[in-house]
Image: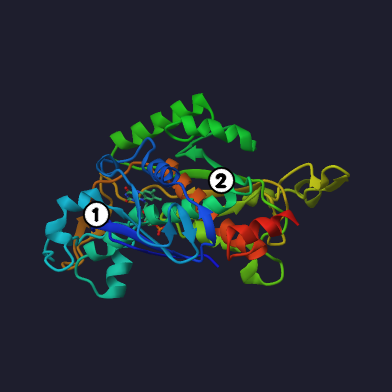
Amino acid sequence: MLRLLTAGESHGQAVTGILEGMPAGVRLSKEKINSYLSKRQSGYGRGGRMKIEKDCIQILSGVRGGITLGSPISFMVVNKDYENWVEGMDPFEGNLNYKQVHHPRPGHADLAGALKYGFDDMRHVLERSSARETTARVAAGSIAGHILSNFNIEWASHVRQIGSVSIREKEVAFDALKKAEHSSVRCICKQTEEEMIKEIDTAKAKGDTLGGIIEVQISGLPVGLGSYTHWDRKLDGKLASSLMSIQGIKAVEIGDGFEGVVQSGSLIHDEIFYEEKKGFYHKTNHAGGIEGGMSNGEVLIVRCGMKPIPTLMKPLKTVDFHQKTPHDAAVERSDTCAVPAAAIVAEAAAIFVLADAFMETFGADSMKEMKERWKK
Ligand SMILES: Cc1cc2nc3c(=O)[nH]c(=O)nc-3n(C[C@H](O)[C@H](O)[C@H](O)COP(=O)(O)O)c2cc1C
């Protein structure tokens, strides 16, 4: 079983993680992990913070000579911005009065977090609730993804919608997703990309923010990852939990999702065929590659809806936490739209779950064992 613990404050020294349960004998590429981290930092609509950070992984344990040992992999990604925040963030010398936050931002953990933990200063909350934490999840997803790459399992993502601008295509083939890699908003259509960029510029000029819809696809999965036998073994349930936990994600759908429920059964279910060479297959994929909580051999398709960024440069109304009087919400340097970056986080969150499910079926001790069981 793969387990991940993450730690780190947004302006603290580093984001760290412990990835426990990785099989032995997986060859890791540092360049691959770093290039994935850098994709999370990119995307049109992001704020100044990402210009400061240039994320690079440092692996502290569990790997020798580029090969996993089967022991816990601990890693860290240093926050370059820490040097500007030492005065407030140093674990022992930090000044607790530094940049305090008393005006909770609607849409963030600020208010509920301060009430729950009894804080006077919402800095304590936002430093940890920040999406900077997703750096650790992308690093861990990338490491776990090295398992799947050994079995020709591939993944990709694209942005279907930003604000009110969406691509026209209902279905996008896995191979077409490569086009998203060349787009600053991860859009597969040039014309829609321009409209999305305009939408972001308009929102930014108004001090406003945008959300959108992401799609992640995974191809090459074998039949039978996950299980129908018990609720907490279902692959769709595990994916939804992992994806929904990403900061700002408010909806997750698999396959046709919400659109599918208004169709009649005769149109929405994927009929089953058999050919000697191909084995069992479906001609359509409304189910998005999962039936009965298990992968069914088709491309896995999952979509996530991200709410607009809650820190607005034209601040929303809130209440001063101590005076209980109306006030503008706090403003921190912030993104206008982080949907393209969230697509990479969603890929990583999905890969993590799939790598875990793969290990459950094909062995969790070593790559050698997995390859032998895969052949059978
Ligand atoms: C990659 C990424 C970057 C984000 N950047 C920002 C940001 O700059 N400012 C902000 O207010 N929210 C940002 N968010 C969104 C917030 O983290 C999120 O809305 C907040 O944590 C509350 O989300 P929740 O209600 O889903 O937990 C970002 C989210 C992601 C995934």
Res. 15 visible in picture: yes
Res. 236 visible in picture: no
Front-most of residues 140 and 282 = 140
Decide if ligand 1 comes within 8 Å of the CB at mark 1: no
Give the residue at x 80% y 46%. 281
Q: Residues within 10 Å of mark 2 (few under 14, many from 20)?
A: many
Q: Position of residue 351 (x, y in %)?
A: 54, 53
Give the residue at x 50% y 25%. 190
User: Which residue position is annotated with label 1?
Assistant: 329
Horizontally, is 276 left or right of 159 in the view?
A: right
Residue 216 is tagged as: 2
Q: Residue furthest front?
A: 65
Decide if ligand 1 comes within 8 Å of the CB at mark 2: no
Q: Quadrant of the C terminus?
A: bottom right
Q: Quadrant of the N terminus?
A: bottom right
| Amino acid type assigned to the residue bearing label 1 in the image | Ala
